Amino acid sequence: MKRMLLMGPPGSGKGTQAERISSQLGIVAISTGDIFRENVRSRTKLGTEAKQYIDRGDFVPDSITNNMVCDRLAQVDVADGFLLDGYPRTVTQAQFLDHVLADKGQQLDCVLQLTADSEELVTRLLKRATVDGRTDDTEKVIRRRLDLYQHETEAVVWHYEELGLLTRVNGTGPVEEITRLILPA
């Protein structure tokens, strides 16, 4: 069984690598970004609340995010493992996740952090905004997200490094090469 986190700043390739890793390991990839976007598209109460934060480039509050992730981890398809992409983003969320897993007699097996240069990330995200028509990816919002990641999420990286679970991988380069660094043959 594999229970993994995939971390990295916005645009570092987490979604792409999550798909590849989950496929190769036969585990479910869970993206909080996808969960948020689905709720926004469906105009759920949660989606309406989350959209206000997303449009500003802010993180959705822990109370909303934690409950969504907890509900998702209770679903049958994660019994054989999961790969969380985009969660946890704060130490409070990390501690919540650790507690939720401990209550089930589980723990994380691995935390992967993709790294990349900030200007490379801005370029990638602006391109994605054009291709995907994502209105939340303006340059101002992108830079705010990168700042938030640096100031808030980096503490989560240190949390998992202290637990001996963290592996850093350079997220710059061909997709296949990055996957090989993550999942050597």
Image: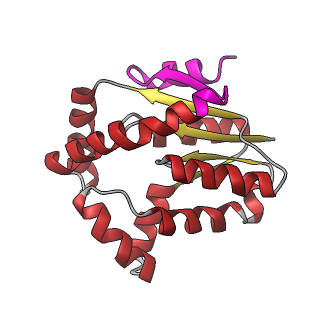
At 58% from the left and 36% from the top, the residue drawn is 20
Where the N terminus falls, by quadrant?
Answer: top right
Residue appearing at x 37%, y 69% in the figure: 50
Q: Residue at x 44, y 76 (%)?
A: 46
- In the rendered view of the protein, which quadrant contains the C terminus? top right
Q: In the rendered view, does 56 fall on the left or right side of 161?
A: left
Q: Is residue 10 visible?
A: no
Q: Nearer the viewer, residue 51 or 58?
A: 58
- Number of callouts in the render? 0
Residue at 85% of width from left, 51% of height from top?
105
Quadrant of the rendered image containing residue 110: top right
Residue 83: horizontal and vertical position, in percent?
63, 45
Residue 2 painted magenta: no
In this view, the residue farthest toward the right is: 105
- Using the image, determine if residue 121 lies above or below residue 152: above
Q: In the rendered view, how is the structure colored?
A: secondary structure
Q: Percent x, y for residue 127?
A: 22, 41
Q: Which segment is the magenta one?
A: 160-184
Residue 89 seen anywhere in this rendered image of the structure: yes
Pinpoint residue 169: horizontal percent, then vertical percent: 50, 21
Q: Is residue 181 magenta?
A: yes
Q: Of residues 34 and 176, which is closer to you in this image?
A: 34
Q: Could you tell whether 143 is left or right of 93 in the image?
A: left
Residue 111 in the image: above or below residue 36: above
**Left or right relative to 119: residue 25:** right
- Residue 81 percent across, percent down from the top left: 75, 47
